[in-house]
Image (tube, rainbow, N blue to C red):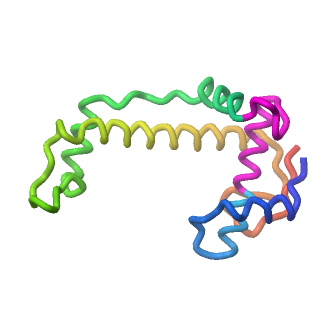
Amino acid sequence: MEISDDDVFQEMQYQTDASNVEEVIFKAAQALVVQQLLLQEASIKKNDANEEEKINQLISDNVVIPTASIESCQRYYDNNKVKFLDKERNETLSFTMVEEHIKEYLQNQSTTSGIKEYINVLAADADIKGFDFKDPSAMNIKIQ
């Protein structure tokens, strides 16, 4: 499937965290390539009735996310106490007060990392022409 300039242009509106036009274009193209990789792996077409559900299931089946242990939460707390400063009282919040927030944060980090790794595996197995995940200058995108 070929991703057109028009497709990239349409996707550009969602790339609000880019710092310049070149980065916006690259992130838009990257998002479209990732979307196509996931659609192909899930064996569905864009705008399939259950597209989001099927992609979520694909990720769930292929990405193992470890649960953050109390020990890993405590280690994160110990190494980042400055992040847990109550500025009004000028004291550090106790571990028990922030443990659930830390656990959620670590889970989100693990999920993001796992999904990125899975996408890298899909990209390595695909024959992608005209796009390099590390080279913003390649914009003639075709996935086979």
Who's the residue at 78% across and 65% down the image? 138
Decide: is 133 above or below 77: below
**Magenta residue check for 125:** no
Where's residue 39, x and y in %?
A: 78, 37
In this view, the residue in front, 65 or 53, is 53
Q: Answer left or right for 89 relative to 62.
A: left
Q: Pick out the residue farthest to the top.
A: 61
Decide: is 94 above or below 4: above
Q: Which residues are magenta?
A: 30-51
Where's residue 43, x and y in %?
A: 82, 29
Quadrant location of residue 10?
Answer: bottom right
Decide: is 65 above or below 135: above
Quadrant location of residue 56?
Answer: top right
Q: Quadrant of the C terminus?
A: top right
Who's the residue at 45% across and 38% down the image? 110
Decide: is 59 above or below 11: above
Who's the residue at 80% across and 31% down the image? 49
**Magenta residue check for 48:** yes
